Image (cartoon, rainbow, N blue to C red):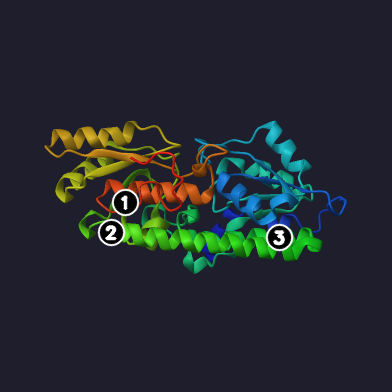
Amino acid sequence: MKVGRRWLLKVGSLALMVLSTGLGAVPARAAEQPLQVVATTGMIGDIVRNVARERAEVTQLMGPGVDPHLYKSTRSDIASMLRADIVFYNGLLLEGKMTDALVRVATSGKPVHAVTELIDEEFLLEPAAFAGHYDPHVWMDPLAWGKAVDAVQGKLAELDPDHADAYRANAAAYLEELERLDAYAQEVLTSVPPERRILVTAHDAFNYFGRRYGFEVEGIQGLSTESEAGLKRVEELVDLLVEREIPAVFVESTIPERSVRALVSGAGAAGHEVQVGGQLFSDAMGAPGTYEGTYVGMIDHNVTTIAQALGGETPPRGLNGELAQVQ
């Protein structure tokens, strides 16, 4: 099993570090010309923007409301990656439908890297219902996501050594932000009564969150939104909501609400009122140019929304007082 797990980790990362070495040199660039960087998801794009700052122009392939589990690369995506100096993706099979495109770009000689590559295998979650596959939603734990920051910083420094010191300094500052975010999450989520620390969402995107902050996590769908929400699973969760008197469930920005609404209706029919506690950002961040369109804002929104809906105490507008709307 250990060999199988190690192989799956490499497949989840596509082994692109191996593919992208020795297959052709990256064209020389002018020393002060910004790096052209492609990131698959918003969470990864946010890391690059904070670590590289003015040293990079970032093209992000997936925007708000886009489900990376189902996303298929377009011709323009492939063209952007082939023009880029470096490409970052999540790995662990998150971008499963992009595998062929990522391999194609890697074999062209471009540096293509999974940001989860520095995370120790023993840290990764392998839920029983998804045996043989690691949970890719590492960004739900800000401290774990710091390892992705280290990965980006290291690869940018390798590619652009003249600015390695700046990348290290910027990464250190960003990691301090993530530590502050984690401390805030610990504080407000601890204020939720212990019997209410149950997070019910559309799919299993919050397992790292649950482990970090002591929440029981239940999703209607599995780790990938490609799986279907079965009637039996909905019935099981309705029974859980009623038995445990859970006051709120949560919809997600990248998944239709119908399955979560079915839980609300089912619990109501059984005599227990359940509210939709708010919309959470799971596989994508908020709109560009908004606070929720940053990684810190995304997690701040989730933490504050969850805590408020389940009876905890939070500042009115979150960690930095910048949340646009809190349920």
- Local crowd at mark 2 within 10 Å, few (<14), some, or many (≥20)? some
- The x and y percentages for residue 256 are 40, 32
Query: SS class of the residue under badge 3?
Result: helix
**Mark 3 — residue?**
155
Q: Judge whether 78 appears above or below 308 on screen.
A: above
Q: Judge whether 193 appears above or below 227 on screen.
A: below
Query: SS class of the residue under badge 2?
Result: loop
* Residue type marked 3: Lys
**Mark 1 — residue?**
307
- The x and y percentages for residue 74 are 66, 32
- Total numbered labels placed on residues in the image: 3
Distance from disc 1 to disc 2, alpha carbons, whole Å, reads 8 Å
- The x and y percentages for residue 130 are 41, 53
> Which residue is pictured at 65% across the width and 58% down the height?
152
- Quadrant where the C terminus sits is top left
In this picture, residue 29 sits left or right of residue 229: right
**Mark 2 — residue?**
191
* Residue type marked 2: Ser
Dot placed on the residue nearer the N-terminal end, 3 or 2: 3
Residue 201 position by quadrant: top left
Looking at the image, do the residues carrying marks 3 and 2 touch, with CB atoms under 8 Å apart?
A: no
Residue 13 position by quadrant: bottom right
Mark nearer the viewer, 3 or 2: 2
> Which residue is pictured at 81% across the width and 54% down the height?
23
- The x and y percentages for residue 313 are 29, 54
In this picture, residue 135 sits left or right of residue 193: right
Near-viewer residue (149 or 100): 149
Near-viewer residue (294 or 92): 294
* Residue type marked 1: Ala
